[in-house]
Amino acid sequence: MPQFEKNRVLPGTLYLVSTPIGNLADLSERAVKVLSEVDFVAAEDTRNSGLLLSRLGISRPMISYFEHNKRERGEEIVARLQNGESCALVTDAGTPAVSDPGEDLVALCASRGIRVSAVPGPVASITALTLSGLPTGRFCFEGFLPPVKAKRLARLSALAKEERTLLFHEAPHKLTRTLEDLAAVFGGDRKIAVCRELTKLNEEIFRTTLAQAAAYYKANEPRGEFVLVVSGAPERETLSENDVLPLAEQVFEYEKEGLSRKDAIKRVAHERSLPKNEVYQAVLSKEDSE
Protein backbone atom coordinates (compact mmCIF):
# COMPACT_ATOMS: atom_id res chain seq x y z
CA MET A 1 0.00 0.00 0.00
CA PRO A 2 1.25 3.53 -0.71
CA GLN A 3 2.70 5.31 2.31
CA PHE A 4 0.54 8.43 2.20
CA GLU A 5 1.84 9.72 5.53
CA LYS A 6 5.25 10.16 3.91
CA ASN A 7 3.76 12.60 1.39
CA ARG A 8 3.55 15.43 3.89
CA VAL A 9 5.80 18.38 3.10
CA LEU A 10 8.81 18.46 5.44
CA PRO A 11 10.53 21.65 6.62
CA GLY A 12 14.00 22.42 5.31
CA THR A 13 13.47 20.28 2.19
CA LEU A 14 13.97 21.02 -1.50
CA TYR A 15 11.36 19.26 -3.66
CA LEU A 16 12.09 18.62 -7.33
CA VAL A 17 8.59 18.78 -8.78
CA SER A 18 8.06 17.48 -12.32
CA THR A 19 5.49 19.43 -14.32
CA PRO A 20 3.67 18.53 -17.57
CA ILE A 21 5.53 18.82 -20.88
CA GLY A 22 2.28 19.59 -22.69
CA ASN A 23 -0.76 17.95 -21.16
CA LEU A 24 -1.90 19.39 -17.82
CA ALA A 25 -3.60 16.09 -16.94
CA ASP A 26 -0.14 14.52 -16.55
CA LEU A 27 0.49 16.46 -13.32
CA SER A 28 0.46 14.03 -10.40
CA GLU A 29 -1.68 14.33 -7.30
CA ARG A 30 1.43 14.44 -5.16
CA ALA A 31 2.89 17.26 -7.27
CA VAL A 32 -0.23 19.34 -6.69
CA LYS A 33 -0.05 18.63 -2.95
CA VAL A 34 3.60 19.65 -2.68
CA LEU A 35 3.12 22.80 -4.76
CA SER A 36 0.19 23.73 -2.53
CA GLU A 37 2.03 23.26 0.76
CA VAL A 38 5.65 24.38 0.32
CA ASP A 39 6.69 27.76 1.69
CA PHE A 40 7.84 28.99 -1.70
CA VAL A 41 8.37 27.90 -5.32
CA ALA A 42 11.59 28.44 -7.29
CA ALA A 43 10.91 28.51 -11.02
CA GLU A 44 12.90 28.79 -14.25
CA ASP A 45 10.30 31.31 -15.47
CA THR A 46 7.92 32.65 -12.83
CA ARG A 47 5.48 33.78 -15.50
CA ASN A 48 5.05 30.31 -17.00
CA SER A 49 5.00 28.52 -13.66
CA GLY A 50 2.76 31.21 -12.18
CA LEU A 51 0.23 30.50 -14.93
CA LEU A 52 0.39 26.78 -14.10
CA LEU A 53 -0.21 27.44 -10.41
CA SER A 54 -3.06 29.80 -11.24
CA ARG A 55 -4.77 27.14 -13.36
CA LEU A 56 -4.48 24.77 -10.41
CA GLY A 57 -5.90 27.34 -7.99
CA ILE A 58 -2.61 27.47 -6.06
CA SER A 59 -1.13 30.66 -4.63
CA ARG A 60 2.45 30.41 -3.35
CA PRO A 61 5.32 32.93 -3.09
CA MET A 62 7.63 32.53 -6.08
CA ILE A 63 11.24 33.40 -6.93
CA SER A 64 13.14 32.90 -10.16
CA TYR A 65 15.99 30.41 -10.49
CA PHE A 66 17.61 30.06 -13.90
CA GLU A 67 20.99 29.77 -15.63
CA HIS A 68 22.05 33.40 -15.28
CA ASN A 69 21.15 33.91 -11.61
CA LYS A 70 21.72 30.39 -10.27
CA ARG A 71 24.83 31.24 -8.24
CA GLU A 72 23.45 34.04 -6.07
CA ARG A 73 19.86 32.72 -6.08
CA GLY A 74 21.07 29.24 -5.15
CA GLU A 75 22.71 30.61 -2.01
CA GLU A 76 19.50 32.48 -1.16
CA ILE A 77 17.38 29.33 -1.55
CA VAL A 78 19.80 27.26 0.54
CA ALA A 79 19.77 29.88 3.32
CA ARG A 80 15.98 29.75 3.46
CA LEU A 81 16.04 25.93 3.51
CA GLN A 82 18.56 25.99 6.36
CA ASN A 83 16.15 28.24 8.25
CA GLY A 84 13.46 25.57 8.00
CA GLU A 85 11.48 26.67 4.94
CA SER A 86 10.44 24.20 2.24
CA CYS A 87 10.86 24.88 -1.48
CA ALA A 88 9.52 23.34 -4.70
CA LEU A 89 11.86 23.66 -7.68
CA VAL A 90 10.14 23.58 -11.07
CA THR A 91 11.36 24.08 -14.61
CA ASP A 92 9.29 25.36 -17.54
CA ALA A 93 8.27 21.78 -18.35
CA GLY A 94 9.33 18.30 -17.36
CA THR A 95 11.75 17.24 -14.64
CA PRO A 96 14.00 19.85 -13.00
CA ALA A 97 17.76 19.16 -12.82
CA VAL A 98 17.78 17.26 -16.15
CA SER A 99 19.60 19.42 -18.71
CA ASP A 100 18.62 22.24 -16.38
CA PRO A 101 20.39 24.53 -13.85
CA GLY A 102 18.53 22.70 -11.09
CA GLU A 103 21.41 20.21 -11.06
CA ASP A 104 23.60 22.94 -9.50
CA LEU A 105 21.05 23.59 -6.77
CA VAL A 106 20.81 19.88 -5.96
CA ALA A 107 24.62 19.66 -5.77
CA LEU A 108 24.71 22.71 -3.49
CA CYS A 109 22.07 21.21 -1.19
CA ALA A 110 23.96 17.92 -1.11
CA SER A 111 27.17 19.72 -0.10
CA ARG A 112 25.33 21.50 2.75
CA GLY A 113 23.52 18.40 4.01
CA ILE A 114 20.08 19.67 2.97
CA ARG A 115 17.36 17.12 2.25
CA VAL A 116 16.26 16.85 -1.42
CA SER A 117 13.16 14.89 -2.46
CA ALA A 118 11.93 14.14 -5.97
CA VAL A 119 8.32 14.25 -7.11
CA PRO A 120 8.62 12.19 -10.33
CA GLY A 121 6.68 12.93 -13.47
CA PRO A 122 7.06 13.79 -17.16
CA VAL A 123 10.47 13.70 -18.86
CA ALA A 124 10.55 14.71 -22.53
CA SER A 125 13.60 12.63 -23.46
CA ILE A 126 12.31 9.37 -21.94
CA THR A 127 8.86 9.94 -23.42
CA ALA A 128 10.45 10.34 -26.85
CA LEU A 129 12.61 7.25 -26.37
CA THR A 130 9.59 5.07 -25.62
CA LEU A 131 7.84 6.31 -28.77
CA SER A 132 10.83 6.15 -31.10
CA GLY A 133 10.70 2.53 -32.16
CA LEU A 134 14.48 2.39 -31.60
CA PRO A 135 16.32 0.24 -29.01
CA THR A 136 15.55 1.38 -25.46
CA GLY A 137 17.61 -1.05 -23.38
CA ARG A 138 20.72 1.15 -23.44
CA PHE A 139 20.69 4.85 -24.22
CA CYS A 140 22.76 8.01 -23.80
CA PHE A 141 21.21 11.40 -23.01
CA GLU A 142 23.12 14.34 -24.52
CA GLY A 143 20.64 17.20 -24.11
CA PHE A 144 21.40 20.28 -26.19
CA LEU A 145 24.48 20.25 -28.42
CA PRO A 146 27.00 23.14 -28.21
CA PRO A 147 25.89 26.19 -30.24
CA VAL A 148 29.38 26.79 -31.69
CA LYS A 149 29.84 24.69 -34.83
CA ALA A 150 33.39 23.52 -34.09
CA LYS A 151 32.45 22.36 -30.58
CA ARG A 152 29.25 20.78 -31.88
CA LEU A 153 31.08 18.75 -34.52
CA ALA A 154 33.71 17.73 -31.97
CA ARG A 155 30.98 16.45 -29.64
CA LEU A 156 29.30 14.54 -32.46
CA SER A 157 32.62 13.09 -33.60
CA ALA A 158 33.20 11.80 -30.07
CA LEU A 159 29.76 10.12 -30.24
CA ALA A 160 30.15 8.67 -33.74
CA LYS A 161 30.98 5.17 -32.46
CA GLU A 162 28.54 5.22 -29.52
CA GLU A 163 26.42 2.07 -29.85
CA ARG A 164 23.69 3.17 -27.45
CA THR A 165 20.61 5.04 -28.65
CA LEU A 166 21.28 8.80 -28.45
CA LEU A 167 18.86 11.45 -27.15
CA PHE A 168 19.12 15.15 -27.99
CA HIS A 169 16.98 18.22 -27.31
CA GLU A 170 16.69 20.91 -29.98
CA ALA A 171 14.93 24.20 -30.56
CA PRO A 172 13.03 24.70 -33.85
CA HIS A 173 15.30 27.46 -35.22
CA LYS A 174 18.38 25.22 -34.80
CA LEU A 175 16.84 21.92 -35.91
CA THR A 176 17.86 21.90 -39.60
CA ARG A 177 21.45 22.79 -38.78
CA THR A 178 21.65 20.05 -36.16
CA LEU A 179 20.15 17.42 -38.46
CA GLU A 180 22.63 18.32 -41.21
CA ASP A 181 25.54 18.02 -38.79
CA LEU A 182 24.25 14.69 -37.48
CA ALA A 183 23.97 13.34 -41.03
CA ALA A 184 27.45 14.57 -41.94
CA VAL A 185 29.14 13.00 -38.91
CA PHE A 186 27.04 9.88 -38.31
CA GLY A 187 26.10 9.13 -41.93
CA GLY A 188 22.84 9.96 -43.64
CA ASP A 189 21.43 6.44 -43.38
CA ARG A 190 21.44 6.39 -39.56
CA LYS A 191 17.88 6.04 -38.19
CA ILE A 192 16.19 8.83 -36.26
CA ALA A 193 12.85 9.54 -34.63
CA VAL A 194 12.09 13.27 -34.65
CA CYS A 195 9.63 13.79 -31.80
CA ARG A 196 7.71 17.07 -31.81
CA GLU A 197 5.28 18.66 -29.33
CA LEU A 198 5.11 15.58 -27.09
CA THR A 199 1.78 15.02 -25.26
CA LYS A 200 0.31 18.09 -26.97
CA LEU A 201 -2.49 18.27 -29.53
CA ASN A 202 -0.02 18.41 -32.43
CA GLU A 203 2.26 15.61 -31.21
CA GLU A 204 4.22 14.08 -34.09
CA ILE A 205 6.72 11.20 -34.29
CA PHE A 206 8.65 11.25 -37.59
CA ARG A 207 10.63 8.00 -37.98
CA THR A 208 13.11 8.24 -40.85
CA THR A 209 16.85 8.59 -41.60
CA LEU A 210 19.11 11.52 -40.77
CA ALA A 211 19.48 12.49 -44.43
CA GLN A 212 15.73 12.38 -45.06
CA ALA A 213 14.98 14.30 -41.86
CA ALA A 214 17.49 17.02 -42.78
CA ALA A 215 15.98 17.34 -46.27
CA TYR A 216 12.41 17.41 -44.95
CA TYR A 217 12.96 20.17 -42.41
CA LYS A 218 15.01 22.19 -44.88
CA ALA A 219 11.89 22.32 -47.05
CA ASN A 220 9.38 22.54 -44.16
CA GLU A 221 9.80 25.10 -41.39
CA PRO A 222 10.24 23.37 -38.00
CA ARG A 223 7.72 24.36 -35.33
CA GLY A 224 7.49 23.40 -31.69
CA GLU A 225 10.00 21.79 -29.36
CA PHE A 226 11.90 18.70 -30.48
CA VAL A 227 13.53 15.61 -29.01
CA LEU A 228 15.77 13.70 -31.42
CA VAL A 229 16.23 9.97 -30.85
CA VAL A 230 19.09 8.64 -32.98
CA SER A 231 20.04 5.00 -33.37
CA GLY A 232 23.44 4.00 -32.07
CA ALA A 233 26.41 3.07 -34.25
CA PRO A 234 26.59 -0.47 -35.62
CA GLU A 235 28.50 -2.98 -33.54
CA ARG A 236 32.24 -2.50 -33.81
CA GLU A 237 32.73 -5.52 -36.06
CA THR A 238 30.83 -3.76 -38.85
CA LEU A 239 33.28 -0.85 -38.68
CA SER A 240 36.41 -2.93 -39.28
CA GLU A 241 36.59 -2.13 -43.01
CA ASN A 242 36.70 1.60 -42.30
CA ASP A 243 39.14 1.15 -39.45
CA VAL A 244 41.77 -0.40 -41.74
CA LEU A 245 41.60 2.33 -44.37
CA PRO A 246 44.84 4.33 -44.72
CA LEU A 247 44.66 7.52 -42.68
CA ALA A 248 44.46 9.84 -45.67
CA GLU A 249 41.78 7.73 -47.36
CA GLN A 250 39.64 7.81 -44.24
CA VAL A 251 39.96 11.61 -44.09
CA PHE A 252 38.88 11.83 -47.76
CA GLU A 253 35.87 9.57 -47.05
CA TYR A 254 34.68 11.87 -44.27
CA GLU A 255 35.15 14.88 -46.54
CA LYS A 256 32.84 13.19 -49.05
CA GLU A 257 30.24 12.94 -46.26
CA GLY A 258 30.37 16.71 -45.80
CA LEU A 259 33.00 17.35 -43.12
CA SER A 260 35.63 20.04 -43.64
CA ARG A 261 39.27 18.95 -43.94
CA LYS A 262 39.96 20.16 -40.40
CA ASP A 263 36.95 18.35 -38.89
CA ALA A 264 37.67 15.18 -40.87
CA ILE A 265 41.25 15.12 -39.57
CA LYS A 266 40.03 15.73 -36.03
CA ARG A 267 37.53 12.88 -36.28
CA VAL A 268 40.09 10.39 -37.69
CA ALA A 269 42.60 11.36 -35.01
CA HIS A 270 39.99 10.77 -32.32
CA GLU A 271 38.87 7.42 -33.75
CA ARG A 272 42.43 6.13 -34.20
CA SER A 273 43.72 7.66 -30.92
CA LEU A 274 46.44 9.47 -32.86
CA PRO A 275 47.79 13.05 -32.76
CA LYS A 276 46.02 15.30 -35.26
CA ASN A 277 49.38 16.31 -36.73
CA GLU A 278 50.13 12.69 -37.64
CA VAL A 279 46.87 12.43 -39.56
CA TYR A 280 47.51 15.81 -41.22
CA GLN A 281 50.96 14.71 -42.36
CA ALA A 282 49.50 11.51 -43.82
CA VAL A 283 47.06 13.61 -45.86
CA LEU A 284 49.86 15.88 -47.12
CA SER A 285 52.00 12.89 -48.08
CA LYS A 286 49.13 11.30 -49.96
CA GLU A 287 48.39 14.52 -51.88
CA ASP A 288 52.08 15.05 -52.69
CA SER A 289 52.33 11.54 -54.13
CA GLU A 290 49.45 12.07 -56.54
Image (tube, helix red, strand yellow):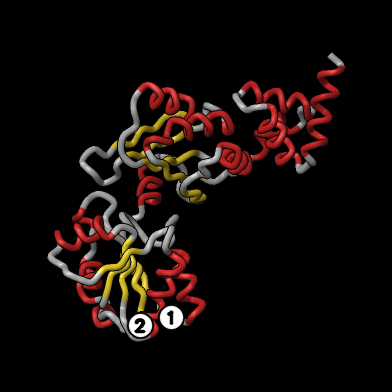
Q: Position of residue 154 (x, y in %)?
A: 62, 41
Q: For residue 198, say whether it is visible.
A: yes
Q: Residue at x 71, y 29 (%)?
A: 241
Return the mark for residue 12: 2
Give the x, y percent position of residue 28: 23, 64
Looking at the image, residue 285 sits to the left or right of residue 249; the answer is right
Which of these two is toward me, 127 or 257? 257
Identify the residue at horizontal 47%, vertical 82% (top origin): 113
Does any portion of residue 233 appear in the rendered image?
no
Mark 1, residues whose alpha carbon is within 10 Å: few (<14), some, or many (≥20)? Answer: some
Residue 70 rendering spot, x and y as whole percentages? 43, 64
> Within the image, what quadrant is residue 217 found in?
top left
Instruction: From this view, report whether residue 20 is shown above or below residue 271.
Output: below
**Residue type at tag 2:** Gly
Measured from the top left, where is residue 284 in percent x and y? 82, 24
Q: Which residue extends farthest top?
A: 290
Give, as a three-letter code, the residue at label 1: Ile
Label placed on residue 61: none
For the residue labelled by badge 1, is the local secondary structure a helix, a strand or a loop?
A: loop
Residue 114's disc is 1
